[in-house]
Image: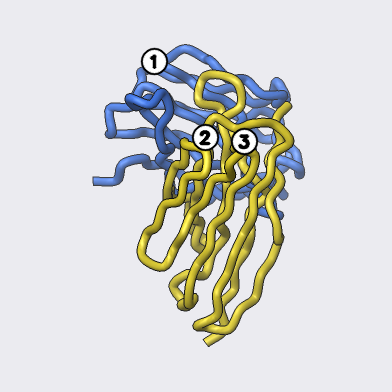
Chain colours: A yellow, B blue
Amino acid sequence: GQQVMQIPQYQHVQEGEDFTTYCNSSTTLSNIQWYKQRPGGHPVFLIQLVKSGEVKKQKRLTFQFGEAKKNSSLHITATQTTDVGTYFCAAFSGGYNKLIFGAGTRLAVHP
Amino acid sequence: DTAVSQTPKYLVTQMGNDKSIKCEQNLGHDTMYWYKQDSKKFLKIMFSYNNKELIINETVPNRFSPKSPDKAHLNLHINSLELGDSAVYFCASSQEGLAGVDEQFFGPGTRLTVL
């Protein structure tokens, strides 16, 4: 079945540094979603990318969808302690809105 | 005003017991899901219902049985609990948007510990 590989598994940064997590698939994706899960919390939807080469921004967060629609990235500029959590990419596999999640990247931000 | 709610939040039980987790959404969504998140944070879909009809049934042991009495509720019953069932179980819901897909709204999770 479809798999979505996500790296890195962990990232420790100093507050103010940038952070990027990457998502890759061996197959072309129809779209990709990103979720954030705070420690002890539940996944919360951040964004959905659909178009080849699409770039979307949410304040300090920049999301990209590759030209071939096989990879995606989430970049956070000047991290803050509120950015702490696990970031997941997720892609639909088959029909019925079946989401396949990447393994997640756990971000720790040191003040 | 919680969009997706789950009960209980924590569940500690002995091996071999049977337990249920309940989920309700007040978003008017047609589709509901159960996910399992293990200790390594890996999130995997278990089941999905659309308008009370089972549409996704992953390779989950028969001991897990979902039930959807109406489209706002999706419960999960687990028989003969095993140590490996310890995890956080998330309920989620979604509504297919104009683009054919839509975001999923997750409940707060139920942390199940099997002793």
At 39% from the left and 31% from the top, the residue drawn is: B94
Find disc 2 in the rendering and name its residue. A31
Q: Residues within 10 Å of mark 1 (few under 14, many from 20)?
A: some
Towards the viewer: B114 or B101: B101
Amino acid carrying label 3: it is Ile
Q: Quadrant of residue A20?
A: bottom right
Note whether residue B45 is visible: yes
Marks 1 and 2, how far apart in space? 24 Å
Residue A8 x %, y %? 70, 61
Residue at (49% x, 54% y) in the render:
A63
Q: What residue is rendered at 52% in x and 51% in y?
A: A64
- Tell which subunit mark 1 falls on: B
Q: Quadrant of residue B96?
A: top left
**Between B51 and B13, the one nearer to me in the picture:** B51
Marks 2 & 3, CB-CB < 8 Å contact: no
The answer to whether residue A79 is above or below residue A99 is below
Type of the residue with mark 2: Asn
The kind of secondary structure element at disc 3 is strand
Q: Residue at x 51, y 56 (%)?
A: A37
Q: Quadrant of residue B95?
A: top left
Q: Are marks 1 and 3 on the same chain?
A: no
Give the Cα distance between marks 2 and 3.
12 Å
Chain letter for mark 2: A
Q: Is residue B48 above or below residue B38?
A: above
Question: Farthest left residue?
Answer: B1
Disc ID at residue B51? 1
From the image, state whether disc 1 or disc 3 is nearer to you. 3
Q: Which of A79/B31 is in front?
A: A79
Residue that mark 3 sits on: A100
Callout 3 crowding tier (Cα within 10 Å): few <14, some 14–19, many ≥20: many
First of labels 2, 3 by sequence position: 2
